[in-house]
Image (cartoon, rainbow, N blue to C red):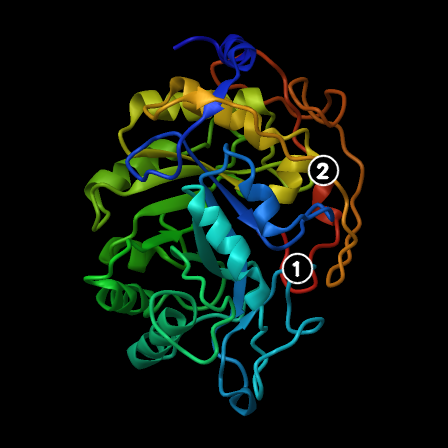
Amino acid sequence: MQPFSLLFAVVASLGIAQVFGFDITRNDNLAVYWGQDSAGNQGSLSSYCQDDTIDNIVMAFLYVFFGPADTLSQPEIDFANTCNQFDFSTFPGTDLADCSFMASQIEACQAKGKIVTLSLGGATGQVGFSSDSAAESLAKRVWNEFLGGSSSTRPFGSAVLDGLDLDIESGSSAHYDTFVNTIRSLSAGASKRYYITAAPQCPFPDEWIQPALDASLFDAVFVQFYNNFCELSEPNNYNFDTWASWAKSGSDNKDIKIFIGAPASSNAAGTGYVGPNTLGNFATDAQDSSSSMGGVMLWDASEAVKNGNYHQKIKSILTANGNGPKKPSNSTISATASKPTATTKSKSGSSLGSDSTEGSSSGKTATKASTSAESKDENAASRINSRFFRARD
């Protein structure tokens, strides 16, 4: 494998960084979370779909599983400045936001070969099940309101999402296998494929979703290698190999894909950010060593664009070393600011490593098959996050 800085330079000069759409069998997919306006400059969903480097957009979040009884116990969703229950209309008698204006955006993304999925949970989501019957109930409701079923309360109207993501970071781990199995049962025989992913923390086994991961069929896991001792900026503790080993020996789906989850900027997480060269080295090492490698997950789209289109640099590296098709790239998203209507944030200043576009090098050095220095952001944890959650603390 070529040293990563040289590899990226060659790819950039050739303009080769794109693929033809999401393919779960590849090891160079790029998934990005969208919806929480982490950087304060979040564009519309469709604006990110113009960028061919993104394969999977994960909408964040459905953050309340069961609303109050006087709202028909409907779930609740929030996509910050784009659509939420406070600044946009809701379905009568519920706190479920009507985001049907987004249907055409979702369908436009899908027409470009991307999959658009919905993440349930978040760092402070009101989640969990009291019983198998409760898990079955939510699964049926989510199927009817967001996936292939039918309901008078479909937040995205006629648009049919491509699957679900479980970002569970609190509560009990019980009954999630029942939820997943019910979705699988409902989608059996469907004309389209539905994907189910999870976003566990990197410490293994995960505290909240591991029982379901061991007992149910997931297509991929977006392992959060940040805000933990096993994060990317702590290479001696980084444990991708542990997750790759589990994929073959412990997962119910032996073809499950492991994505390296990373912050897209120093402000996207409290700790764990590394520049594109270092993340590229982690990614290419995984591509070379494990058939379970699926690609990279970034939190989040707005942070990636603001950080010098960080995602495009990562995708170039993934594609050059990966097993997917390649084509010339002409994709760019500009980081035009849009004033959020539903979230307020402030960020502390920080300086980053030598391969970052955000500042000069300082702080703790992390190396992985490279000698370039990249510092860990020590101040980002103090920032104020979205009204409900925050950047996956």
Q: Which residue lies at the image location 69% right of the left edge and 41% below the top edge?
A: 267
Vertically, is 265 above or below 146? above
Q: Residues at badges 1 and 2 in contact (C-beta under 8 Å)?
A: no
Vertically, is 264 above or below 95? above
Specify whether residue 203 is in view: no
The amino acid type, in three-letter code, at marker 1 is Thr
Which residue has dot 2 on it?
A: 335
193 vs 272, left or right, is left
Q: Which residue lies at the image location 61% right of the left edge and 60% below the top edge?
A: 79
Dot 2: few (<14), some (14–19), or many (≥20) neighbours within 10 Å? Answer: some
Along the line of sight, the residue nearer the viewer: 285 or 91: 91
Outermost residue on the bottom side: it is 70
**Between disc 1 and disc 2, whose residue precedes?**
1
Q: Count all numbered tags in the image, as a single digit.
A: 2
Dot 1: few (<14), some (14–19), or many (≥20) neighbours within 10 Å? Answer: many
Q: Which residue lies at the image location 46% right of the left edge and 58% below the top edge?
A: 118
Q: Residue 26 location in percent, x, y? A: 32, 32
Q: Which residue lies at the image location 62% right of the left edge and 30% below the top edge?
A: 332
Q: Residue 34 location in percent, x, y? A: 57, 50
Which residue has dot 1 on it?
A: 82
